[in-house]
């Protein structure tokens, strides 16, 4: 059986981004998962039934550590002799593609699920642009996970069009529509959670799910909601996700509002987001950049209209005023207006609900995405 090595920088990405996919592929390839060490890697081994291998990589620019990790990857590829090396996340992509090229791995694939460098400026941007082009040059195929992202790569001249391929309709892993289903959250569970969070019957609940960082538009979201909550008492905002103050901190004034505004409910990282989605009515996701946003898929699948920024991925899932609202990037006023619209127009909001789940099941069902990727793997000679 040919070997397929999948690599992410940190183990939580291997566990979450590719959940179920490694097990599916293991019926066709000998799959090995590679990432830094941690409990999620143990879960990958158990849940996916694949071998795993630890190689520590950092998420920041660390030349000495990066060289060491590249050498370890190179030695690992030379000993394992994989047919395909498929990387995800920026650092794993750069180091993995370089090491795979040096080890003469025949098929070197890198999935692009967003470009953090788009928010960088000056010398840092110039450096990251060079690294991006270098990564693509080492790969045999680049797999952007949305059509908008493919266009950004072409516009920035990172590589030629013929080296790019979007799998299916986009998305790295599709979505398990049987898992993200509101009917799986009991009324009792919903009532308990509402009581715990202090959500009243009249409240319209907005939810944000993701890293609580600047790049996800959280500063604008918190400010917009803060203004809204002064005019409308019957609304809440649930923030689900971890903060990353060491990488991309929020403004101090945003942190203060989160602490002081009793209508903002910061619940941290949750292993199961479904109960929180089930007690909410609207997803607010004003991110600056994405590849293909899983959160928008998940919440749409559970019947939530989504307010999203006009960026690739988001504007491929959401059609304005059909299953959500699309607003300009970094536009706090437009975000507040969109949230006010959802409060003031319950009939229009409920009409959007009818077009949420059906659009996801038609286009992004997980097994469809997996089979499309498998078909591409099988086409490699």
Image (cartoon, helix red, strand yellow):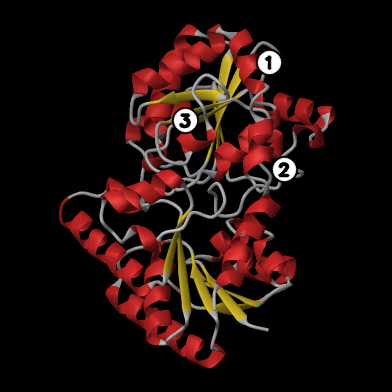
Q: Tell me what residue is drawn at x 62 percent, y 34 percent.
A: 299
Provide the secondary structure element on which disc 1 rests: loop
Q: Nearer the viewer, mark 3 or mark 1?
A: 3
Element type at marker 2? loop
Crowd around label 1: few <14 · some 14–19 · many ≥20 (10 Å): few
Left or right: 332 as drawn, with respect to 110: left
Helix, strand or loop under label 3: strand
Q: Nearer the viewer, residue 192 or 134?
A: 134
Residue holding disc 2: 177
Can you identify the residue that label 1 sits on?
Answer: 200
Q: Nearer the viewer, residue 65 or 28?
A: 28
Cα–Cα gap, marks 2 and 1: 29 Å
Q: Quadrant of the N terminus?
A: bottom right
Q: Position of residue 33 (x, y in %)?
A: 59, 73
Q: Picture coordinates of residue 28 (x, y %)?
A: 70, 74
Residue 13: x and y in percent read 55, 60
According to the picture, the residue beneath numbered tag 3 turns out to be: 308
Quarter of the image with the C terminus in it: bottom right
* Location of residue 7 with respect to 196 vertically, above or below: below
Taking depth in this image into account, of 6 and 149 the one nearest to the observer is 149
């Amino acid at each position: 059986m040919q070997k397929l090595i999948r690599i992410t920088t940190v183990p939580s990405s291997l566990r979450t981004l590719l959940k179920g996919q490694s097990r599916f592929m293991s019926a066709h390839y000998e799959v090995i998962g590679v990432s830094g060490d941690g409990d999620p890697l143990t879960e990958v081994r158990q849940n996916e039934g694949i071998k795993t291998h630890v190689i520590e990589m950092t998420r920041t620019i660390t030349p000495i550590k990066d060289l060491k990790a590249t050498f370890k990857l190179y030695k690992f590829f030379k000993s394992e002799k994989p047919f395909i090396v498929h990387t995800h996340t920026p650092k794993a992509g750069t180091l993995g593609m370089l090491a795979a090229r040096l080890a003469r791995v025949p098929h070197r694939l890198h999935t692009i699920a967003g470009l953090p460098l788009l928010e960088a400026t000056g010398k840092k941007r110039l450096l990251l642009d060079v690294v991006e082009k270098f990564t693509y040059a080492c790969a045999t195929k680049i797999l952007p996970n949305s059509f908008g992202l493919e266009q950004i790569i072409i516009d920035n001249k990172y590589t030629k069009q013929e080296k790019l391929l979007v799998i299916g309709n986009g998305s790295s892993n599709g979505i398990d529509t049987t898992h993200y289903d509101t009917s799986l959250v009991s009324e009792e569970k919903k009532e308990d959670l509402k009581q715990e969070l202090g959500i009243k019957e009249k409240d319209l609940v907005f939810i944000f799910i993701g890293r609580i960082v600047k790049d996800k538009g959280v500063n604008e979201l918190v400010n917009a909601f803060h203004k809204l909550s002064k005019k409308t008492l019957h609304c809440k905002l649930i923030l689900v996700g971890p903060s990353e103050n060491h990488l991309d901190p929020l403004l101090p004034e945003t942190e203060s509002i989160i602490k002081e505004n009793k209508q903002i409910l910061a619940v941290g990282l949750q292993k199961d987001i479904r109960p929180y989605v089930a007690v909410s009515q609207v997803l607010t996701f004003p991110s600056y950049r994405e590849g293909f946003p899983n959160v928008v898929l998940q919440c749409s699948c559970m019947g939530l209209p989504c307010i999203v920024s006009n960026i690739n991925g988001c504007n491929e899932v959401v059609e304005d005023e059909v299953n959500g609202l699309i607003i300009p990037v970094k536009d706090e006023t437009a975000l507040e207006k969109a949230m006010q619209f959802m409060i003031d127009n319950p009939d229009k909001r409920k009409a959007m609900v009818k077009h949420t789940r059906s659009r996801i099941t038609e286009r992004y069902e997980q097994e469809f995405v997996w089979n499309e990727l498998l078909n591409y793997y099988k086409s490699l000679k």
